[in-house]
Image (spheres, rainbow, N blue to C red):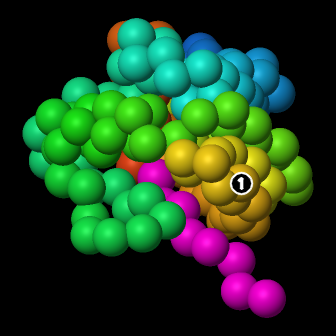
Amino acid sequence: MKRGFVLFVVLAFIFPLSCEQRVNIEAERSKIRTVLDNYVASVENEDMELYAENVAHDPEMVNFGSFGYPIIGWEALKKVMEDQNASLSKTKIEINDLKIHVSDTGKLAWATCLWNLKTWMDENPVDMPVRCTWVLEKRENQWVIVHFHKSIRAG
């Protein structure tokens, strides 16, 4: 009787664990790569609709661009991007060294990469090496960027 009870207790703990849905990390990385590719495409094409689809619209989120003060909230971020679109043209971004990490739960991810950003400001070409860090969250089965930090590489 005692062995039967112990077996029951063990199975009671193991069974729910075996029923948990396993996260396909590679599939999630692929989805996240698509979000990051869409982000780059939205910047290159000045496509605010595509940009809005891939970034959270949280009023409390804080992001850091390559220059200036923290960008707090979706409305401030939208304004920064609209101003950027008005002042830059012919933007091209080459992504290098992209690393995507997905949490065991498959609900949170972070990524790092290097950009070679080439653009024009008025009649002046600009070539900037940019370091990027991204934090993404899976919401309603969609990955969205909830934070980013960009900085200019030294040297």
The local secondary structure at tag 1 comes to strand
Judging by the rendered image, the residue that carries numbered circle 1 is 125
Tell me if residue 32 is in the magenta stretch. no
Left or right relative to 117: residue 42: left
Residue 126 to residue 138: above or below: below
Query: Residue 148 versus residue 136: which sits nearer the camera?
Result: 148
Q: Residue at x 26, y 65 (%)?
A: 70
* Left or right relative to 96: residue 45: left
The foreground one among 23 and 137 is 137
Identified at 77% across, 23% down, the residue is: 30
Left or right: 44, with 30 as reference point: left
Neighbour tally class for label 1: few under 14, some 14-19, many 20 plus, Cα within 10 Å: few
Residue 26 position (above or below residue 81):
above
The quarter of the displayed image where residue 126 is located: bottom right
Q: Which residues are magenta?
A: 148-155
Residue 42 x %, y %: 56, 23
Type of the residue with mark 1: Pro
- Residue 4 seen in the figure: no
Which quadrant does the C terminus fall into?
Answer: bottom right
Q: Which residue is situated farthest in the front direction here? A: 123
- Furthest residue to the left? 59
The kind of secondary structure the magenta stretch mainly shows is: strand
**Count of numbered marks:** 1
Percent of width and height locating residue 27: 77, 19
| Residue that appears at 45% across and 22% down | 51
Residue 148 horizontal/vertical position (percent): 46, 52
Q: Is residue 149 magenta?
A: yes
Q: Residue furthest right?
A: 97
